[in-house]
Image (tube, grey):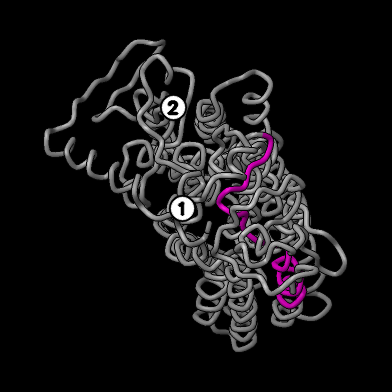
Amino acid sequence: MLGSAPGPRDRPGVAQHQHTPSLSAGTNQFGIGLLTHKYPSCKLRSTMFGLTFNRWYLFGAAFVIQFCIGCIYAWSVLNHPIDLAVYGDAKKGRAVNAFYIAIGVFGAATSTMGPTIERKGPQWGVFIGTVLYMIGHIVTALGCHYKSITWIYIGYGVITAIGMGMCYISPVATLQKWFPDYRGTAAGFAVAGYGAGSVVWSKVYLPTIDAVGLAWMFVLLGAIMSFAMFASALVLRVPPADFTVNGLNIHGDRVDESEVMEEKLDDAYKAVQTPKNEDAANKSPIKQLTLKQAILTPDYIFMYIMFFANQLFGVIVLSRLSGMCTDIFNKSAGTASDIVSINSAFNCCGRLAFPAISDLLVRFLQVEKTFARKVLYYFTLGAQVVVLGSLPTVIRHNSYTVFVIEIFVLTCSYGGGFGTIPAFVTDMFGAYNIGPMHGIILTAMAIGGVAGGLSFNSAFNSKVADGMSIGEAYIDNIQVIFVIVCVGFLVLFLVRTNATDRFEPGYHYSLGGKRVISIPPKERDAMKQQEAEAEAATEKLPESVV
């Protein structure tokens, strides 16, 4: 795969302390910058097929991987063909459950596999994930052939979804470490591929089914996507722990690059101390925390609730959009497929635009980075509150054009939330353990897909069976989600981006420079926090970054 030329075999995991002036931010240091003094002649170059590695290549690799697994967002196009193949009734409403199960398993896989991928590296994560992805497609094809919805649930809903989860977080976490100077843009570009994939696959599925049949469609397209992901995985790798670019380390903290190159690894990263009040007001330094400590902080918990609200309606609508167009507004399957494709483009644009805008706020308007990410969520959640509040009226008046516009706005906001969350989490808690922390917060999507999606589907089918119109059945469920999104919007205010508030024991919240909430810690909790900070300060760096 990768070769370092010329020089002895690489020995990753050991820090090189020799100063090398020729090192540039774009040059790969994997397996080279981590050599011992025994290999001083090794050049700082890594080649593959004659090309020297550059960190910008990771953009393309990440986009391709996300593009392939983004096919899940085109699932609504397959609901009717699968229901027809298995039950002989295109409106049976059972195929959509495979999507909800897949979303749940996807989220569970990102959180449970995150620590392992963090240790073993992104290549391992994508390789194993791609194998599972292909196996799942084969099992799904068998389910279609033998008319077994259970096999489809297991194949796509479980096996393929596990592979998708592993392939999703691997490149995202990698880009966060390589691009501390463009963290939002890197995250957005990576997950934009996820949205772009559904644009293409939603238009490819039906013609492929017409050409080779439903079962062989899963085999053929699954093989094509698996090959593309295998090839892209060859580019992925993590930077060394002492990597810096444009004066920033992997956490996004400003450092002296010449000093970092000379220092030993143990001295290069000391635990960040609680800042003094006069220094902290306009800064958000990273506080070294273990994974367990980080996910139990009030800010992470509030971010989790906020993200759950941001994605809930989107993950449900994306699986039913085609059916909503045909069943509520009596549009043709072809028209519905076109709407799904256009909607996917808005998903892609939201994933790319919102985090990129947050980067612009940081770089050109000098907005504190965590606050810049938070501002974007005010827009994504605020837009959803407006859309969900007016959507029942739009459906009752059968206003198809307005419905489509509102869905596009909602989907763009939904995508923006997904695109911004990796940078938001990294800026709040640092680059170490970003894979697991990002994976855990994605379980919000799992809960939304399984609990929200399945309950939505069950309530919807029950209401329709009782004689309620399809439009009113949707409206009843939309009103419940509207309340949840409003709660998420309010909870967002409680996420603290002021460093003084975040680092002081207890929970404190300042607004306009004045404390509006101040809850002191219990004596026992304060002692535990001091012990936790001491533990984090002396804790050995994760294996994935040394």
How far from the left and from the top, in percent, is residue 510? 35, 17
Relative side of 1 to 51, left or right: left
Q: Which of marks 1 and 2 is nearer the N terminus?
A: 1
Query: Is 463 situated above or below 143?
Result: above
Q: Which mark is residue 497?
A: 2
What residue is pinned by disc 1?
Answer: 433
How far from the left and from the top, in percent, is residue 293? 32, 47
Residue drawn at (59%, 53%) of the image: 17
Q: In this picture, which residue range is highlighted in magenta?
A: 221-246
Query: Does the magenta segment cover residue 518?
Result: no
Query: Is 319 situated above or below 228?
Result: above
Taking depth in this image into account, of 203 and 90 the one nearest to the observer is 203
How far from the left and from the top, in percent, is residue 29? 68, 56
Q: Where on the picture, by quarter, is residue 91? A: bottom right
Q: Is mark 2 on a helix, strand or loop?
A: loop
| CA separation in Å, label 1 and label 2 | 20 Å
Q: How crowded is mark 1: few (under 14 residues within 10 Å), some or many (20 or more)?
A: many
Relative side of 18 to 378, left or right: right
Q: Of circles 1 and 2, which is in front? A: 1
Residue drawn at (63%, 42%) of the image: 244
Q: What element carries label 1?
A: loop
Q: What residue type is labelled 2?
A: Thr
The single residue placed furthest to the left in the displayed view is: 523
Query: Is 156 situated above or below 412?
Result: below
Residue drawn at (58%, 42%) of the image: 260
Whether residue 387 is visible to the viewer of this picture, yes or no, is no
